[in-house]
Image: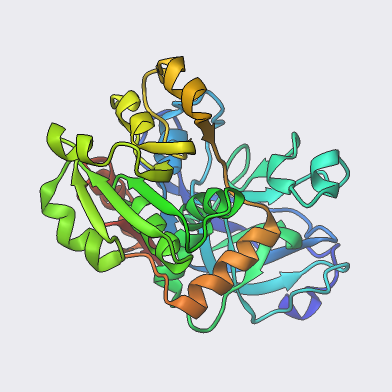
């Protein structure tokens, strides 16, 4: 079969994975027919797939967009097993990665500007289609990336979503050696944000509700640590930071973080608090401060991020589980008992 992989008319064998069949249900074995391989598609034989909190939201249909049955997973590492007839950038046997986005229209304003991640017709790897908790997956070749040899597959998998989610805003906001950066939350996203901010040469302050994470934060590259349960510690950083990246999915007194910004500073959200963010406008006006949000990055940024991670030793801290233990791993992630990213391996 693989000898004919350049022929987009070839129908491959059934893909086997673990699927949710209803909102919040445990994952069960599921097979589906992927049909003919598209001209611009590649098929990946999966070796590793990270468990992202987005997968858990999709399993539970928290966002109201899930269609069942579906196979979750969008932090995928594997080997190209087949390529469509128009694919020239990848070849069978190559180690590659696939993240949250698997396709875009290629023609809209955002795609033609190299900002495919903002395409209104963007296709998620496991939204209305089947993802990476499986033996194989397919995607447009433009969203499949060679993985540098320096990055082990287990540690590289979370970079395809968690890594680019924090890398994109740091690059977009021009973080550099003169920058003073705060990272709120030392978890799946935050532990990667600290590493990337340090690579960019920034002065890095880590914020956490857990005093026990101070040593870990400093080992990851943070220069200083703030226990957010201590009012005095928060007061001491007032007016000291240029950029604060919030990676947490919890409510906070966001006004305190606005006060921690220097003039022209920015508070950027990549984590989603459960309640609306409420801010007094006066500190924004008086200091030309701003609030922003950021999604994943473009294919160009993902390639850049992987190269930076490989050259500077940025790696996810992971806990590995066999693919057939995905339900156990998901429960552990739900209980916040994984430091810092769970990865499934075949």
From the viewer's side, name the closer residue of 90 and 2. Answer: 90
From the viewer's side, name the closer residue of 154 and 230. Answer: 230
Say whether residue 244 is visible: yes
Quadrant in the picture for residue 91 = bottom right
Q: Quadrant of the C terminus?
A: bottom left
Quadrant in the picture for residue 306 = bottom right
Residue 46 lies left or right of residue 227; in this view the side is right
Name the residue rendered at 36%, 47% in the picture: 182
Name the residue rendered at 53%, 59% in the picture: 160
Q: Give percent across and percent down for residue 36.
A: 79, 57
Q: Give percent across and percent down for residue 49.
A: 45, 60
- Rendered image coloring scheme: rainbow
- The correct choice, above or below, for 261 with respect to 252 in the image is below
Say whether residue 20 is visible: no
Q: Give percent across and percent down for residue 281.
A: 46, 16
Could you tell me how many numbered marks the image carries?
A: 0
Q: Quadrant of the N terminus?
A: bottom right
- The correct choice, above or below, for 1 with respect to 65 in the image is below
Q: Give percent across and percent down for residue 132.
A: 52, 55
Residue 98 lies left or right of residue 242; in this view the side is right
- The correct choice, above or below, for 181 with respect to 259 in the image is below
Name the residue rendered at 40%, 52% in the picture: 180
Name the residue rendered at 38%, 64% in the picture: 195
Residue 143 lies left or right of residue 147; in this view the side is right
Quadrant in the picture for residue 15 = bottom right
């Amino acid at each position: 079969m693989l000898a004919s992989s350049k022929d987009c008319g070839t129908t491959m064998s059934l893909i086997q994975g673990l699927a949710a069949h209803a909102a919040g249900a445990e994952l069960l074995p599921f097979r589906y027919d992927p049909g003919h391989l598209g001209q611009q598609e590649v098929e990946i034989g999966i070796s590793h797939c990270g468990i992202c909190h987005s997968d858990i939201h999709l399993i539970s249909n928290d966002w109201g967009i899930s269609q069942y049955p579906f196979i979750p997973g969008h932090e995928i590492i594997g080997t190209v097993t087949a390529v469509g007839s128009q694919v020239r950038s990848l070849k069978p046997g190559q180690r590659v990665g696939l993240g949250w986005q698997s396709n875009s229209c290629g023609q809209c304003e955002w795609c033609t500007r190299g900002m495919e991640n903002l395409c209104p017709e963007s296709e998620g790897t496991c939204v209305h289609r089947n993802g990476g908790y499986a033996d194989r997956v397919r995607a447009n070749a433009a969203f499949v990336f060679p993985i540098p040899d320096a990055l082990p597959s287990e540690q590289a998998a979370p970079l395809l979503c968690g890594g680019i989610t924090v890398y994109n805003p740091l690059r977009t906001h021009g973080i550099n050696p003169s920058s003073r950066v705060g990272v709120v939350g030392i978890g799946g996203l935050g532990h990667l944000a600290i590493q990337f901010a340090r690579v960019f040469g920034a002065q890095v302050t880590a914020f956490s509700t857990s005093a026990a994470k101070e040593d870990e934060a400093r080992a990851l590259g943070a220069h200083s640590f703030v226990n957010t349960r201590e009012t005095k510690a928060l007061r001491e950083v007032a007016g000291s930071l240029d950029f604060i990246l919030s990676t947490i999915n919890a409510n906070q007194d966001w006004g305190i973080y606005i006060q921690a910004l220097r003039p022209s500073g920015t508070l950027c959200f990549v984590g989603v608090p459960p309640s609306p963010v409420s801010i007094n406008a006066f500190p924004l006006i008086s200091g030309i401060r701003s609030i922003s949000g950021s999604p994943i990055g473009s294919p160009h940024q993902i390639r850049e991020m992987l190269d930076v991670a490989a050259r500077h030793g940025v790696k996810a801290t992971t806990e590995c589980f066999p693919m057939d233990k995905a339900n156990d791993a998901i429960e552990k992630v739900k209980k916040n008992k994984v430091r810092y990213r769970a990865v499934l391996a075949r």
